[in-house]
Amino acid sequence: MVCEFRVDVPAWQGSGQQAAIGGVKNIIAVASNKGGVGKSTLATNLAVALSQSGAAVGLVDADATGPNLPTMFGLPNGFQAQSERGLHPVERYGVKVISLGFLLPPGAPVVWRGPMIGSAIRQLLHDVDWGEIDYLLIDLPPGTSDASMSMAQEAPIAGAVVVSTPQQVALEDASKAVTMFEKLDVPVFGLVENMSYFITPDTGQRVEIFGHGGARDAADDLEIDFLGEVPLATEVRAGGDEGQPIVAFDETNPAAQAFVAIAERVAVKAAASALLQAPTIPVL
Ligand SMILES: Nc1ncnc2c1ncn2[C@@H]1O[C@H](COP(=O)(O)OP(=O)(O)O)[C@@H](O)[C@H]1O
Ligand SMILES: [Mg+2]
């Protein structure tokens, strides 16, 4: 028996400075200043976990120059290049996902200047018929780049989830991302430590390849919430490469359970911000 249910998610109103996206209740950015720390992996698995909780979820690949979400969702690069409808979101694992990679042939490099990235992001957010969405996740590229700035200008972001691996250099970059969001007046939901530790399959020994706990300490220092830690796991990497997000395929996997727990915390943070936000007073 297929059981359909929907949760009742409150909506973030924003400050009124950015145009709301019709039908979208909460926009959540997943970011870090560093590449390769797991932003796209986290965004993918959070999106699937939120959808499994009964929410309506969308996911925007804002990494215009290196879109990875087609691969992570098992969608072929360039498959919408000839589509009469043009670029449009596709539902996969319960998530409506959109990526410029849907238009680009595999391996095609994208060399874009800042203003072009800004206009691409604007179109991905505002020119798409999203329908009713509780959480629209944005997978940002690394860096305090044009994409992040455009995002913050183009849409009322309810909160940012910043991801880091435990080593010092990654944490330094993560704290730059936190500072960037604070400057852009975007609330930061908290910090996630990815690749936190590795359990060897044969002996069960725990190995802390990049160190451990750095993100929790950094969150304390930055006075933001620590949202959880995700182990380094072969199944997460394989799931990403094969377009089979671990959360959708193995709920017993410790990394999948970590993603689900983080998704629950993100949902609570979003609900708390939406319910506690000050009502906007119209200025005449
Ligand atoms: N917890 C994890 N365990 C194993 N591999 C991971 C984990 N998180 C990410 N990866 C892998 O690391 C690589 C980089 O991750 P990705 O999400 O693309 O990073 P980013 O978006 O920050 O550049 C990918 O191959 C991904 O599958
Ligand atoms: Mg990425």
Image (tube, rainbow, N blue to C red):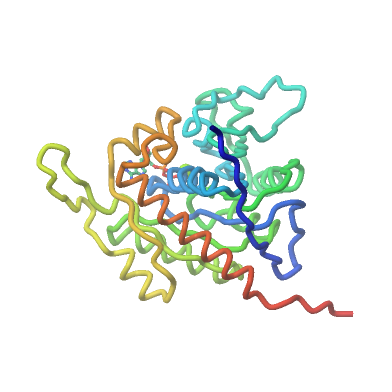
For the view shown, which residue lies furthest in the right direction? 284
The image shows a total of numbered marks equal to: 0
For the view shown, which residue lies furthest in the left direction? 203
Q: What residue do we see at 62% from left, 37% from top?
A: 98
In this image, 59 relative to 143: left or right?
right
The spot of residue 96 in percent (x, y) is 62, 39
Q: What residue do we see at 51% from left, 53% from top?
A: 30
Q: In which quarter of the image is the C terminus?
A: bottom right
Q: What residue do we see at 39% from left, 58% from top?
A: 192
The spot of residue 210 in percent (x, y) is 23, 53
For the view shown, which residue lies furthest in the front direction? 1
Seen in the picture, residue 219 relative to 42 is either above or below; the reply is below
Q: In which quarter of the image is the N terminus?
A: top right
Residue 87: quarter of image: top right
For the view shown, which residue lies furthest in the top direction? 82
The spot of residue 166 in percent (x, y) is 29, 58
Residue 127: quarter of image: top right
Seen in the picture, residue 15 relative to 195 is either above or below; the reply is below
Q: Nearer the viewer, residue 153 or 228?
A: 228
The spot of residue 176 in percent (x, y) is 45, 65
Q: What residue do we see at 71% from left, 46% from top?
A: 119
The quadrant of the rendered image in which ligand 1 is seen is top left
